[in-house]
Image (cartoon, rainbow, N blue to C red):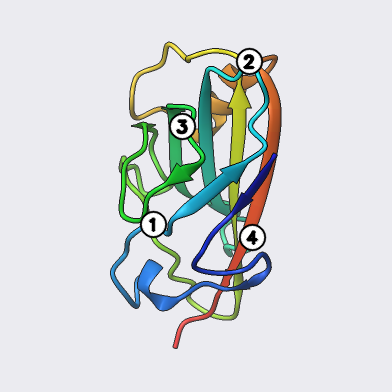
């Protein structure tokens, strides 16, 4: 499985449009090679370079099996990000260049979970149901 974006290449700078310096919207994502038997997708976007530990920017689950996640969309049920909101929280690093990991998971089930769960809870519930996973890394440094 592979995740890409038409907006930026892996390990390259993300356009400001998708950050706090721009429109604060999620970039479009393309997913290829989804395995047979996939019932849903999950997506976690986080920043391991945050000073206080990994910052969770976006948690989405029960995404219909699709090869595209549209820009500025809510493709499934949303969990809470690190500021406790059910939404995409755009990159806004206080200093330096940070890495933003977009991790997609192909699951053999639809998860029976409510919106507002944490990344940790989603990871627990996905255990044993992951058919494949892929990641895309975007970089960002404030202007």
Q: Earlier in the sequence, mark 2 or mark 1?
A: 1
Residue that carries the numbered disc 4 in the rendered image: 137
Q: Nearer the viewer, mark 2 or mark 3?
A: 2
The image quarter containing residue 4 is bottom right
Q: How crowded is mark 1: few (under 14 residues within 10 Å), some or many (20 or more)?
A: many
Q: Residue sitting at 70 percent across and 22 percent down?
A: 131
Q: 77 or 85: which is nearer to us? A: 77
Q: Tell me, for residue 118, which label it has, or none.
A: 3
Q: In the rendered view, would you say 143 is above or below 61?
A: below
Residue 77 image offset from top left, x and y in percent:
35, 29
Residue that carries the numbered disc 2 in the rendered image: 37
Residue 130 image offset from top left, x and y in percent:
67, 22
Q: What element carries label 4?
A: strand
Q: Residue sitting at 43 percent across and 56 percent down?
A: 28
Q: In the rendered view, would you say 109 is above or below 124?
A: above
C-alpha distance separating marks 4 and 1: 14 Å
Q: What element carries label 3?
A: loop
Residue that carries the numbered disc 1 in the rendered image: 26
* Relative to 86, 128 lies left or right: right
Contact check, label 2 and label 1, Cβ < 8 Å:
no
Q: Tell me, for residue 120, which label it has, or none.
A: none
């Amino acid at each position: 499985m592979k995740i890409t974006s038409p907006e930026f290449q892996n390990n390259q700078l993300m356009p400001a449009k998708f950050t706090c310096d721009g429109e604060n919207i999620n970039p479009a994502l393309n997913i290829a090679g989804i395995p047979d038997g996939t019932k849903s997708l999950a997506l976690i976007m986080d920043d391991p370079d945050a000073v206080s530990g990994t910052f969770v920017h976006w948690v989405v689950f029960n995404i219909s099996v699709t090869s595209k996640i549209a820009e500025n969309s809510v493709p499934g049920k949303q969990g809470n990000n690190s500021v406790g909101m059910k939404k995409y929280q755009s990159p806004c690093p206080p200093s330096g260049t940070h890495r933003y990991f977009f991790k997609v998971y192909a699951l053999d089930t639809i998860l029976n979970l409510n919106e507002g769960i944490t990344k940790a809870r989603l990871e627990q519930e996905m255990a044993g149901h992951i058919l494949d996973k892929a990641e895309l890394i975007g970089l960002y440094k404030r202007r």
